Image (cartoon, rainbow, N blue to C red):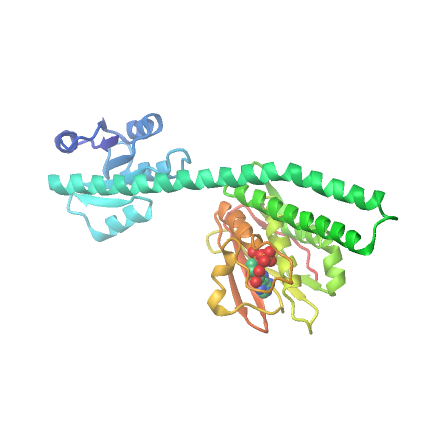
Amino acid sequence: MILNVDDYVPGLYARTKILRQAGFTVIEAATGKDALDLVASEKPSMVLLDVNLPDMSGYEVCRRIRATPEISATTIVHVSATAVQNQHLVHGLDTGADSYLVEPIDAAVLVATVKAFLRAREAEEALRRSNEDLGRFAYMVSHELNEPLRTITVHAQLLSRQLAEQLDATTGESLRFMIDGADRMRTFIDDLLRYSQATHVGRDIREVSLDALLHQTMWNLDAAISESGARITHDPLPTVVADTRIEHVLRNLFSNSIKYRRPEAAPEIHVSAAPLKEGGWVISVRDNGIGIDPLYQGSVFQIFRRLHGRDIPGTGIGLALSQRIVAAHGGRMWVESEPGVGSTFYFSIPQEQTSVSASNTN
Ligand code: ADP
């Protein structure tokens, strides 16, 4: 269904007629308010939106559609009745429109444009559905595997306790392998579960003091930190509005900096925060570890991608999960690294409502 919006009746009539003749279902509106109401109630695939409407500009209608999650993916093509200047066209596209058509519009061009956008939209929809299916599949599989795995661990532990005295060395070792294997599998399943659920920011959004979160993370990783002799320092860190899962991101980055350390140097980890021009922060975690070859720096964020040996435990999910969590906050994650010198991982949390806390540990 296409929504055709124009207060100039002959223009509205002509476009509707062309599109109906081409087999499309068309509904009409003559004001910005009516257009917004119809987009919300009818959910058309596409809106042909006149730029000059009596109650508000087409740009404003477009901005409001983009700001409403349930309809934000609607395809919007601006239509301008006048000879359009480049800056208007750029403004229209910059404020969220997908394309811009200028009157007089040739009938064949109009129909071909609408068809092209509907094709792209169908492909996008199919991709979204397939992603949702995959997410559900990963969730179900990991959820279902948890229970039998717990049974295996519990009974293997029981056996090794009950038979402690009678077990010969080889059987005892076999039982330990079983328990270790089941533990590794549980870590993998937990990571996979978190990954499959991380596409959206959860309901648990709140003011999070990154300073407090950093100390909590250090506390959670206490054993690994003391065993490796790691030193973690930080600049003043802000309080951000975020999902508490941002803790996974910090935990993963710290634990990687410790895991992928150079054998000859204790891990030195430093956390900084820099404000973003448009509001929000870029957080960086720098280490002095083995580093990452420039060739592979992009691919470490792919799920199951592991660059270093099997002897270092890991699932290859941590960075992919972290990137998903950051993306769900509208942010980006990237790395700069020099092999043999160290890596700096960055992630952004874009928002306006943040404030700098006073603490500093250095
Ligand atoms: P995992 O650590 O479980 O393998 P991640 O997704 O956290 O999975 O990391 C993917 C890969 O990126 C790691 O296997 C490692 O090769 C590389 N990597 C991650 N962090 C660092 C780091 N701080 N220094 C060097 N290499 C790293």
The residue lying toward the viewer, choosing from 200 and 103, is 200
Query: Which residue is painted at 66% across and 41% down in the image?
Result: 149
Q: Is residue 149 above or below residue 357?
A: above
Left or right, 330 with respect to 157, comes to left
Query: Which residue is painted at 52% across and 41% down in the image?
Result: 138
Query: Which residue is painted at 85% across and 48% down in the image?
Result: 164
| The C terminus lies in quadrant | bottom right
Count of number-bearing discs: 0
Q: Is residue 154 visible?
A: yes
Q: Is residue 202 visible?
A: no
Residue 332, percent from left and from top:
48, 54
Left or right, 20 with respect to 246, comes to left
Q: Is residue 126 above or below residue 278?
A: above
User: Residue lying farthest right?
Assistant: 165
The residue lying toward the viewer, choosing from 79 and 135, is 135
| The N terminus lies in quadrant | top left
Query: Which residue is painted at 60% across and 40% down in the image?
Result: 206
Left or right, 229 with respect to 209, comes to right
Left or right, 152 with respect to 103, comes to right
Residue 200, percent from left and from top:
50, 41
Residue 133, percent from left and from top:
45, 38
The residue lying toward the viewer, choosing from 299 and 38, is 299
User: Residue lying farthest top?
Assistant: 41
Q: Quadrant of ligand 1?
A: bottom right
Residue 53, percent from left and from top:
24, 34
